[in-house]
Amino acid sequence: MSKVRTGLRWRPQLPAATVLAASAAVLLLVNPAAAIVPQGAAPVTAPADLGRLADERASVVEVILADSAELDALVATGVDLDHHITHTGDGIVVHAVVTGNEVATLTRAGFTFGQVLHTPDDAAQRVAEREATIAAHLAENREYAAAADFSARSTVSDVKIIRADYYTSGDTQVLSVEAKWAQGQTDASPLTVERDSGPGTEIGSGGTQTISRFVDAGVYLYHRGAAQVTSRPAYVRITSPSGDVAVAKVNEWLPIPPKAPEGPGYMKDFVASYLTPTELYDRIKALSAQYPKISEIVELPYRTNGYRRKAQAVLGTANASRVAVDSLAWGHQGGNDISVELADPGVADAPLTVTVTGTQVHVDLATDGSGTVTSTAEQVVAALNAQAGTLLTAYTYRGSPGTGVVAPVARTALSDGLAAPASVSRDPHPVYAIRIGKHRDGSRLGVLAYAQEHAREWVPPLVTIETAERLLRNYAHDRKTRELVDNLDIWIAPSVNPDGGHYSFYDFNSQRKNMTNHCPQDGSADFLGRNSWGVDNNRNYTEYSLFDGYAGASTSCTSGTYAGPSELSEPENRNVDWLAARPNITFSMNLHSSGNYFMWSPGSYAVPGRVSAPRPTLAEESLFWGASSRILTAIKRHRNLAVTPARTGPIADVLYSAAGNSGDMLWYKYGIYAWNFEVGTSFQPAWAEAHAETMEFSNGLTEMLRVARDFDTDRKRPRSSLSVSASATPGMVDVTFSTSEPAAVFYTLDRSRPTYDSTLYGSAGIREGGETLTIPAGTTVHWFSVDAAGNVEKNYKPDGRGNNHNKQKVKAPKR
Ligand SMILES: [Zn+2]
C-alpha cells in the first residue's frame, strides 16, 4: 500500500488542533438557547395542513427561509433538519422534523412553515404496506403448498421452474435457474437441476447444478442459482425432495450485450422490501455463508448500548406535583412488571405510607385533619426512594422542587415503551460489516461503504445490500465484477446504528439518533422525553466538531443534532473510526437520505464568518469532480435521474454545516477520499420509489468501486503546462498552470529544485479553477505535477537529485 500513501503525500495533514481560537464564542452561537432571530422573517400565514401535525409526534414539514443567514439561524436552534434543501428563486426551502409544539415555538420565533410532507401516520402506512407485502408472499406460499398437495400426489407438481436463462459473458457460458418449491418456506434444502447438452440429448447429459433458497425479510421467494456450463442446454429438469418433477425449456438471456459497464448476464435487483437492522445483518451473514471464499463477516469491536430502556412512568399532570419513576431493572428484565398507585386513603390525619407487594407499589398519600391530601411531590419521591428503592428510583419532574400537592393516580404500569417483537435483541447489539474481496489481508486497496448513521433513513442500507449482492452473485460469471472483487478489499456496513434503526421501525419512525439517554434526571430523562434522546451519530466524530467550535451540532441532549458528551463517546462512532483506521482504506461512501446529493469535505464551518474546515486542494477537488461525473452518470443510467451540479460538491457549500460528521473525519484524520450520498427524495418512500432509488444508487456505489480500481491501476503520468498573459501591473506577468488530468503542481520562483515542500498551486476560489499568479517578467518558474495515485510528471524524483522537472522563463507577451 506504500504506493497509495505516497500518492497522498501532498494531502494537507491538518491536526485537529488547528481550530478556531474563538471556540468559546462560537459555542455560544450553537447553543439552542441562543437567539432565534431570522432576519426579515415574513409575517406568518400558516397553511391549512399544519393542522395535521400532532403536538408531540414528529412530522417532516417545509420551512420557508429568506436566505442562508436564516438557514444558519434555524440550524442554530438545534432543530432536527432533513438533508433536503432547495434554493428557490426567492429563498430557501428546507425540511424539518418537528412536532406540532415545536412548530408553534418556531413560528413564534418568526420562522415560516410550508407544507406538511410526512407524518407518523404516513410511516405507519409504509409499515402496513411492508407487512401486507410479506403477508401476501406468505399466503402465496401456503396456497402453493396446499395446491401441490404432496400426500395425494395430485397432478400439480410441488416444484415449478420460474425461469431458466442461458447466456454468454466473454468466453464464459452460464445457466441461471429460478424455481419455486412448495416447501421452500419451511425447508431449507437446496434443489438439484439436471440439464441436457443440447437439442435432442438426454436430460442429465449436460451435468447438474444446485440452486438455493432466496429468503427476504423471513419470506421464502424462490430458489435461484447460476453455474458455468460448457454447452447451451435445451431443457432442464428438477426433481424435488418429495419426488415431484418439473421440466422447462432454456431461454437465451440478453443475446445482444447492452451498453452498460456491466457484462451481459449481469444480475441485479436483489432487494424486495425494507429491511430492519436485524434482517440486514442476517442477510449479509447468509451471503457470506454462501460465498465464503470471497467474503467474510466482521463483527466490529464495539457493541451498541442496546435496544433497551428502563421502564418508566410520569405520574400526575401539573409539573410541580408530578412524580417520575424509573425501574432499576431494564424493562424487559422485570422493569415492565412494576406498577405504582398513588391513593387518597380516605381518612383524616393519615401518614404518607408506601407498601410494596411483589412488583406492585401502593402509596397512601398523607391527609390533614379534614381528610384533604397534603403530600407534595418531593415528599412522595422521598418515600418511594426509601420504601421501594430496590425496585425503582423516583424524582421530581425536570428539576422542579416538587412543592405541588400530589393528586391521586390510579395504578399505572411502568413501561420501557419498546414495541419490537422479542426476536429483536434487547442486549448491547453487535454491529456487523461484510468484507468482500479475494484477498482480505489488507494488501489490496480498501473501500468502505457504511449506512444508517441516521436511524430513520431506510433506503441507504438497501443500497449497500444490493451492492454486496451484485458483487457476490456476479463474481462467478462477470469478468468486470471479478476484477473488482479480486483486486479490492471492500468493507460494507449496512447499519452502523442498529438500536436507532430498530426503534425507527417499531416505535418512532422519525428517530434520527442512537437510543442512548444522556439527559440528566433533572432534564428530560423521564418517560415523556424518550423520543428525543440519543446522540446524532453524524455529529460525534473528531474533526472540526462542536467541541472544536464548529457549527451545525448541538449541546442539548434532546436536539436532533446532539453531538454527545464528547467526541467518539458513542460505540457506533468508535466502530466507524475503527473501520476508517484500516490502513488500506482509500475511498469511502457514507450513505444517507434524502435529497439526491453527492458531497465531500469540508462538511463544516464556524460561524460567524463561515470559516470552513480546510478546503481540498485544486488537484483533490478536480479528482472529486472527475469521479463525480462517473458516479452520477451510473446513477442516471437507471431511470434518467440526474443529481444536479447544485447538489454536488462540498457539504458546507451545498447543504449546511455539520460539525463532527464522519466524512470530515475520514478525510482530515485518515486521508480517505470520503464521499456522501443523500439518496432519494424522502426517508421512507413508498416501496416502488425506494426500490428504484436502491437500484440507481447501487449503480453509483458500484461505479465508485470502479473509480477506486482505476485509481489503483493508474500508472499514467500527468503532464502540465504554463500559460502566460500580460499583467495589469507594468513589469509583471500573469501565470496559470494546467494539467492533463487531476494533479497537484508544486513550483518555485527562486530557481531552486521543486520538491513536495515547495509551494502548491492553489484554487482561485470555491468551485473555481486554478489561481492566477502575478510574478515579475523574466522569472524562471520550476515545477512538476503529481497525480493522486502518486505518478510524477516525467518520472521526476522530487526527493532525489535529478533535474528533469519543468522550467520556463516567463516573458511579457507582446501587446
Ligand atoms: Zn442522514
Image: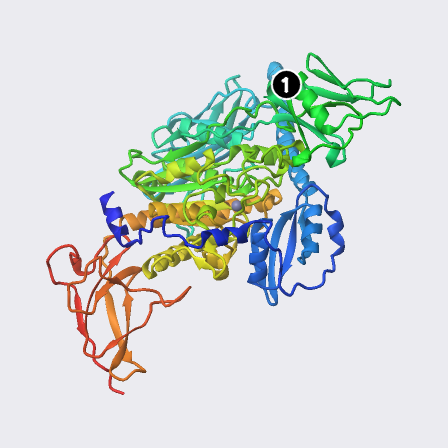
Q: Residue at 26%, 51% (x, y): give it.
A: 7
100 or 182: nearer the viewer: 100
Decide: is 422 above or below 65: above
Q: Is residue 151 visible?
A: yes
In the rendered view, does 318 fall on the left or right side of 205? right
701 or 166: nearer the viewer: 701
- Where's residue 760, x and y in %? 27, 62
Image quadrant assignment for residue 216: top right
- Where's residue 688, x and y in %? 60, 44
- Where's residue 663, x and y in %? 42, 47
Q: Residue at 26%, 47% (x, y): give it.
A: 5
The residue most toward the left is 801
Q: Which residue is mark 1?
A: 389
Q: Amino acid at mark 1?
A: Gly
Q: Residue at 42%, 38% (x, y): give it.
A: 576
Decide: is 64 above or below 535: below
Image quadrant assignment for residue 346: top right
The residue most toward the front is 369
Decide: is 18 above or below 530: below
